[in-house]
């Protein structure tokens, strides 16, 4: 379907597609097999300015919006979710700075982020704080001109490979969620180390590690916004980035659909190409329809967020929820359309199916998305 | 550091069709690309600029359509692009092409000039070296690695059949490059946006102080009579043994084929 993209948006989509086809597709199976971090691809994306899409020109970015970022993420996801997760985690980690960073902090960090010289990670989740993000136990205590961090973050994308970390820690235990604050921590700070790399079902090119803080001292200036804003910053960050996860869903579903449709055209059984069998056609028809609906929702929400609207929690949750459920269903069906071949590693769809599962889990499980939407509905009905 | 890269727009196919009547290339309906070797030349130039500063000017002689190739060069990091286009240039052979490029380069001024090893359509690999001759500057062909660049000199590795030579030259110098030199970069988004807006400098006969008699078809000593794929019959034989044995065997072989 034609979404009437501007010339610049088409340029972003097409260049992301070119990177995907030339640099990602040829090595995605190997990256998956070897669980290898996609450094070369990140370098290409950096050189091609992708890391700066939604960072203002003043800091070396392109000054565009979340929608343009969404287009790039979708294209990369069509080729490999491991790669697109590595890329998208950067914008997740950067939103706290964009939302509440001081001019000094922006000047110090954004140019390196926009140019892709440094990767970014976002550290919220802990062993006892998953869906219940307010249960964070990592502490940050102000001592003179420094905050002292103690605690462990779990399953942090780009952990160990990123240079810049935005981290949520408790500055005032008594205040509960209102006692959390957001900080910037540079890799290499004494007292800051990493756990082992996790061995995962999917998105195996993406790295996931623990962030371990043991009396890690960071300058007071690394506090983002004010003390007590941490939880709000985290929630606003997720509101912004969830359309990116939705775009990942659209992309991986599109990739799986195309592989399945191509296969169905070539594969003959009972003397006919299986695509001419109505049962197969109907699966493909459902897949294509669901993908288009997901894309339309993700694009609409991304554009809505770019208008600067304040409360976007419900819409961004809807985009993430719907598009990632579609991704799971479509990738499973793609394997089904391809039969035994779909189950084999020679074809890309089994990987896409393994990869797609993460989309229903990270940045808030899809149950949590439904909770967010439900909360908003309660508020809305109360107003009526 | 002023760097000029000469690029040629070529048809996107190794299968070039030739008009049997006129013996010229049939370009209609074939999409055009930057000659693949020239992409490596652009990459090399942009890398030198990134390390040493300066400007990269990309130059092509061709019809107005060659503009698209110049814009692509901007998206890869070229600062300025020049289209050498004039009816008087039409029908140039390598001699006239090189003469015209040299005249333009004289006008623009350069410390390093890059060319591709050869064009995938014309395939002569003559334009680089000939241009250097017209400019009366040294050239090094088939370079596969740039070891060092200073303000006044350059050291490179020149690819040979076996191994490579290390060659040093003063500047200005003309280099022709092979694919082993580097991996041409993807265009960048900023580059693509700049490319859309880039101003293309146009130069014609009057702008380069060229002698009209040396231009285009009139200035081309090559008369194409026939074009065909040559049969390669060359044989290679390694003669082994001690130096004396080798000489003895070589003399024997040469006598056998009546070369001595
Ligand atoms: C590969 C990977 C990468 C990740 N990257 C990052 C990262 O970069 N940064 C970061 O901070 N975190 C990251 N995470 C963490 C991720 O966001 C959490 O895993 C996710 O929020 C879910 O938390 P949990 O795993 O602890 O599940 P739990 O919270 O233990 O949930 C278990 C189950 O219970 C359900 N559940 C829990 N509470 C409710 C409720 N109230 N209502 C309905 N259902 C509920 C959940 O939906 C789920 O099905 C990553 C995780 C993975 C696996
Ligand atoms: C025998 C013969 C037959 C020919 N037949 C035809 C024909 O049928 N049709 C036709 O149109 N032309 C023909 N030509 C002309 C010729 O193909 C080119 O126009 C021109 O002379 C370049 O030669 P080349 O393609 O061999 O380039 P090469 O010498 O192989 O190119 C080496 C490098 O020189 C540079 N370069 C070459 N051309 C240009 C340019 N125009 N602008 C900027 N840089 C450049 C590039 O860096 C390139 O990588 C013929 C020439 C000869 C000698």
Image: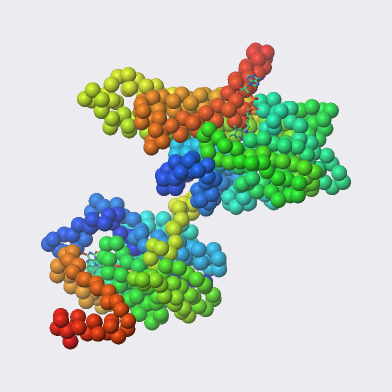
Q: Is residue A297 left or right of residue B257?
A: right
Q: How many marks?
A: 0
Q: Is residue B124 left or right of residue B38?
A: left
- The image position of residue B207, as x and y in percent, is 38, 72
The answer to which quarter of the image holds residue A20 is top left
- Quadrant location of ligand 2? bottom left
Q: Is residue A127 left or right of residue B22?
A: right
Tell me what residue is drawn at x 14 percent, y 70 percent. Answer: B225
Tell me what residue is drawn at x 37 percent, y 57 percent. Answer: B69
Which is nearer the eye, B97 or A163?
Answer: A163
Which residue of the protein is positioned furthest toward the right in this rendering?
Answer: A144
Q: How is the image coloured?
A: rainbow
| Vertical relation: B98 (above or below) A265 | below
- The image position of residue B219, as x and y in percent, is 24, 76
Tell me what residue is drawn at x 52 percent, y 42 percent. Answer: A35
Q: Quadrant for the C terminus of chain B, please.
A: bottom left
Tell me what residue is drawn at x 82 percent, y 46 percent. Answer: A146
- The image position of residue A133, as x and y in percent, is 70, 28
Q: Answer yes or no: is residue A230 visible.
A: yes
- The image position of residue B70, as x and y in percent, is 40, 59
Q: Answer yes or no: is residue B85 visible.
A: no
Which is nearer the eye, B81 or A205?
Answer: A205
């Amino acid at each position: 379907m034609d979404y009437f993209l501007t010339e610049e948006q088409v340029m972003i989509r097409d260049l992301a597609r070119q990177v995907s086809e030339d640099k990602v597709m040829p090595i995605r199976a190997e990256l998956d097999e070897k669980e290898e971090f996609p450094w070369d691809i990140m370098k290409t994306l950096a050189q091609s300015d992708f890391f700066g899409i939604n960072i203002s020109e003043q800091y070396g970015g392109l000054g565009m919006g979340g929608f343009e970022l969404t287009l790039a993420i979708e294209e990369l996801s069509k080729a490999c979710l491991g790669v697109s997760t590595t890329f998208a985690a950067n914008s997740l980690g950067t939103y706290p700075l964009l939302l509440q960073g001081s001019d000094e902090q922006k000047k110090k960090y954004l140019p390196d982020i926009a140019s892709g010289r440094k990767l970014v990670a976002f550290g919220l989740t802990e062993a006892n704080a998953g869906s219940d993000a307010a249960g964070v136990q990592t502490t940050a205590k102000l001592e003179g001109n420094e905050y002292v961090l103690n605690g462990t973050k779990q399953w942090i994308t780009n952990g160990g490979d990123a240079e810049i970390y935005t981290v949520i820690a408790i500055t005032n235990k008594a205040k509960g969620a209102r006692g959390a604050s957001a900080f910037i921590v540079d890799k290499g700070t004494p007292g800051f180390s990493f756990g082992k790399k996790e061995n995962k079902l999917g998105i195996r090119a993406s790295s996931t590690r623990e962030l371990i803080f043991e009396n890690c001292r960071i300058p007071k200036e690394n506090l983002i916004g004010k003390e007590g804003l941490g939880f709000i910053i985290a929630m606003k960050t997720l509101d912004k980035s969830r359309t990116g996860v939705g775009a990942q869903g659209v992309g991986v579903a599109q990739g799986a659909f195309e592989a399945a449709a191509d296969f169905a055209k070539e594969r003959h059984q009972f003397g006919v190409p299986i695509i001419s069998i109505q049962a197969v056609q109907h699966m493909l028809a459902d897949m294509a329809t669901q993908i288009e609906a997901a894309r339309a929702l993700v694009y609409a929400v991304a554009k809505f967020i770019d208008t600067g609207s304040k409360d976007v929690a419900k819409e961004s949750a809807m985009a993430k929820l719907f598009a990632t459920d579609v991704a799971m269903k479509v990738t499973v069906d793609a394997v089904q359309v391809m039969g035994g071949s779909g189950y084999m590693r020679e074809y890309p769809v089994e990987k896409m199916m393994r990869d797609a599962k993460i989309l229903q889990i990270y940045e808030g499980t899809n149950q949590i998305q439904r909770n967010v939407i439900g909360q908003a509905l309660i508020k809305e009905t109360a107003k009526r | 550091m002023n760097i000029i890269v000469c690029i040629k727009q070529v048809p996107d196919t190794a299968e070039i069709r030739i008009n049997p009547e006129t013996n010229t290339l049939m370009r209609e309906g074939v999409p055009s690309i930057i000659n693949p070797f020239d992409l490596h030349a652009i990459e090399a130039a942009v890398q030198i600029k990134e390390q040493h500063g300066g400007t990269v000017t990309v130059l092509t002689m061709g019809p107005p359509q060659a503009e698209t190739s110049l814009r692509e060069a901007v998206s890869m990091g070229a600062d300025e692009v020049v289209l050498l286009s004039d009816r008087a240039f039409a029908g140039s052979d390598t001699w006239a092409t090189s003469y015209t490029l040299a005249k333009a380069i004289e006008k623009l001024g350069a410390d390093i000039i890059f060319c591709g090893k050869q064009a995938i359509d014309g395939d002569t690999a003559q334009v680089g070296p000939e241009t250097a001759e017209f400019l009366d500057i040294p050239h090094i062909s088939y370079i596969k690695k740039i070891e060092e660049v200073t303000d006044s000199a350059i050291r490179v590795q020149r690819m040979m059949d076996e191994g490579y030579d290390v060659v040093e030259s003063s500047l200005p110098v003309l280099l022709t490059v092979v694919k082993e030199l580097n991996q041409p970069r993807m265009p960048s988004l900023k580059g693509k946006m700049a490319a859309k807006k880039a101003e293309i400098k146009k130069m014609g006969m009057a702008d380069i102080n060229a002698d009209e008699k040396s231009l285009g078809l009139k200035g081309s000593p090559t008369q194409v009579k026939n074009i065909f794929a040559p049969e390669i019959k060359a044989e290679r034989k390694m003669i082994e043994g001690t130096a004396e044995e080798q000489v003895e065997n070589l003399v024997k072989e040469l006598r056998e084929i009546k070369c001595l």
